[in-house]
Amino acid sequence: MMTLKFPGKLYLIGEYAVIEKGQSAVIYAVDRFLYTEIEASNTMLIESKFGALDQETMFSDTLSMKYVSKALEVVHEYLGEPQGCYHLTIKSELDSDENKKYGFGSSGVVVAAVIATVAKFYGKTLTNEQIFKLGVIAQYRLNELSSGGDLATALYGGVIQYTRYDNEWLQDHNGDLSLVDRTWPLLNVIPLTKDNYKIAVGWTQTENRTSHYVNKYRHACIEDTGTHQEILKEARKLVEDFVTGWQDKNTILIETTVQSYRELMQRIASWAKINVETQTLTHLIEAAHELGYVAKVSGSGGGDCGYALITDENVENLVKLNKAWNKHDILYLDVKGW
């Protein structure tokens, strides 16, 4: 039996803008994992807590297993391997015991994990970039393209600056599998120094459907192209400054950019009429500020997680931060970078 694991993700900066081609985000891999186990078998069986697939349903559109099914379809097609006989088990730490998501990723990690695991089972050596591209094509076939940041983080781990590929180019080529071995315009994944900073993560215990918020954001972009371009310009500069601060361990620059991006997300929320920073997330951020941390929403907002930047000056306040968050029913998640 072969066992692999793939980390969850936490967006540090670049949210919303990164759904646009050529825009970047910085994403932090966390040590909450999706695990896969695969072994040869007399029959085909794929199992997870959300359902199962067998020889008959492997490429079906079973709703609860659609990401697994499409990932299997794409990887088998690319490898030129017919339906094999193996038993694949998928287990996840990316949700709570009550199946509420933390915001560490879900569908993208599943797609990346299934493709990587099946390729390795067949003894095929694929690069992270090839697996990433296969994952994007699986999402394309499902008509559910994400920014790609979730896929990239699951594969590369660490802390990355991820720049989105040209999705219009992908669509012009109909997501053809031959694209896997071509250069994708604008796509870039740059590993950053992993251990320069640590992150404290607070979970609001509420979920949000990212797709709903993204759709409202896209609608606002179409209705007001001027503001849209201003947002992208500001986001690009802030992400660049954040990367510089992270690499140079310039805490003042990082804290300034995180605070500025929080304000940008608040403007995006007002402009697109979405509740990015809920009252609970505001409590999370303000409680952190009172203890000397800069903090912001992670991801699309509306629930899920926020984070605080741990520095040499505030590390001794972590116990106090935990207690302050608990007063607002925010759970301090014991996660580390991976």
Image (tube, rainbow, N blue to C red):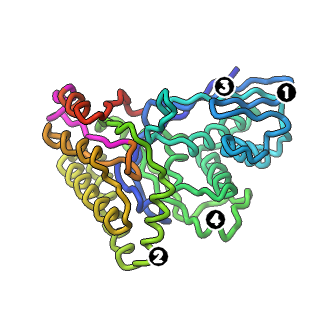
Q: What element carries label 1?
A: loop
The residue at the far top in this view is: 1
Looking at the image, tell me whether mark 3 or mark 1 is earlier in sequence order.
Answer: 3
Residue position marked by numbered label 1 in the rendering: 43
Crowd rating for badge 3 (residues with CA inside 10 Å; few <14, some 14–19, many 20+): some
Quarter of the image where the N terminus is located: top right
On residue 222, which mark appears?
Answer: 2
Per the model, the C-alpha gap separating discs 3 and 4 is: 32 Å
Residue at which label 4 appears: 170
Label 3 or label 2, whichever comes before in sequence order: 3
Q: Mark 3 points at which residue?
A: 37
Q: Is residue 220 above or below residue 100?
A: below
Q: Earlier in the sequence, mark 3 or mark 4?
A: 3
Give the Cα separation between the discs numbered 1 and 4: 35 Å
Q: What residue type is labelled 1?
A: Thr
* Residue 75 appears in the figure: no
The label shown at residue 122 is none
Mark found first going from the N terminus, 2 or 1: 1
SS for callout 2:
helix
Q: Quadrant of residue 69?
A: top right
